Image (spheres, rainbow, N blue to C red):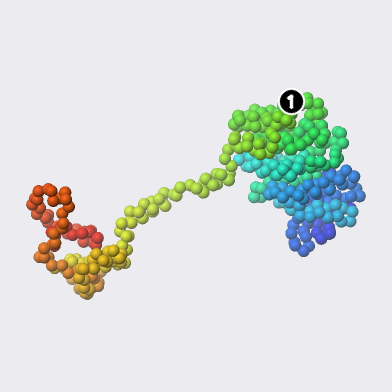
Amino acid sequence: MSFHVGEDLGDYKIVAIIGAGSMGRVFQVEHRLTKRKEAVKVLSAELATETQIQRFEREIAHQARLTHPNIATVHNAISWEGCLILVTEFLEGETLERLLSRGRLPIETGIEYIRQTLSALAYAHDQGVVHRDVSPANLIITPNGTVKLTDFGVSKSFGDLQLTNCGDIVGSLEYMAPEQARGSAHSDLRSDLYSAGAILHEVLTGTKPFGGNRRFAPIVTDAESDPPRPTDLEPRLDQRWNAVVSKALLRDRESRYSSASEFWQAIEQVAPPSSRNASLAAAMKPPRFGVIKAAVASAAMLPFLVAPITRLWYVPPLAGITFHIQAPKPEATSQAVSSIPVRTENVPVPRAAAHPLRAEPVQKNIVESISNQPEPRRALSTDQQSEPASEAPPPAPRKKRFWRKLNPFKKKAQGTP
């Protein structure tokens, strides 16, 4: 049965044709009730062979039980008018194959794609599923940089019925492990890691490890030569990449990485910092100079802000009185000065002596003090009592300085009226 854009497919309406393969065709659809865009893979049971039907049913069963951020999510599976339909999330973006066809990727970006791919494989392997077709064509990169592993059409689970005959090829030849070419009965999770190693080689160098025209016969007969080392193709790479890639592409699967986690740990030892770590480091940079400068200025003004002053006026001194500027006082300070008599008056300021910025009288707290009254003697400490008394030098003539009069916290010099 043929399907076209605009036709109905059960509860779905076909919006666009995404692609076609040996296991069926893929369409973009929209659910009539939820209006959600999804992707459907359709296999016609009338035109498919028995083996194809069994593989499609296996794909549905395997992918439906895998829930991982880097694996395409299965929404539903239905049988409709002689067709098997697999409904999955619709993924916007490009395949890694198309991205690599435009040239080498930045190392940090490519390594991040490899990390997400290995994360998906580690989860699938823990669930007992071997993908068997890990290739850039089956890795979709979404606009936000998320890798989605798709197409479990040739996947195999431990204990599944053997569906591949001798000589059948499953997977992409450019990224296929040697034992997989000889027969899928010998393939396991290390076959997926071999394919991931081939993708890593292409990410680092921009070329496939065995070129674009890999032959099937040399793979099966072990006559295929070893792939070139990454530094032979890209001398600027770290020499340690040679050992990492070579171990993943060993012909003897027993000598390869035993798990996706082990493979990633080897990559992590050589890989440069990822773009996410660089963004985090940028976010944790120290404050800019302007902020530091403002903080220093605030610290310098801290002593003057201990007792905040609401209004500050400069008033020339009058004969016989001393001015005291009222400010909010802490409780301890108010107890210390509670014995000082204070009266409030409106003191007119002479126009000739007034500050040029103030022309009106200001209400002040005036502390009366008698200049001829002697100051009470203070108790001397033990060290001071042991020293011989000496005549205090005559007080230096007091200089009328602006800041001394302005600062309300500066104490009077001893003996000065």
Question: In this orientation, which residue lies closer to the viewer: 123 or 104?
Answer: 123
Residue 326: give x, y in percent of width and height: 26, 68
Left or right? Give the position of 113 relative to 292: right
| Residue on which the image places disc 1 | 225
Q: Is residue 216 above or below residue 307?
A: above
User: Dividing the picture into quarters, in which one does residue 347 lie?
Assistant: bottom left
Q: Which residue is drawn at 78% across and 26% down?
A: 222
Residue 363: give x, y in percent of width and height: 25, 72
The number of discs equals: 1
**One can see residue 352 in this view:** no
Badge 1 marks a residue whose secondary structure is loop
**One can see residue 228 in this view:** yes
**Which residue is most to the right?**
46
**Which residue is most to the left?**
391
Question: In this orientation, which residue lies closer to the viewer: 264 or 334?
Answer: 334
Which amino acid does the dot numbered 1 rest on? Ser
Residue 100: give x, y in percent of width and height: 69, 40
Residue 394: give x, y in percent of width and height: 9, 54
**Which residue is most to the bottom?**
346
Q: Which residue is drawn at 54% across and 47% down?
A: 280
Q: In this view, does 408 lie above or below 293?
A: below
Question: In this orientation, which residue lies closer to the viewer: 291 or 378?
Answer: 378
Question: In this orientation, which residue lies closer to the viewer: 402 or 104?
Answer: 402
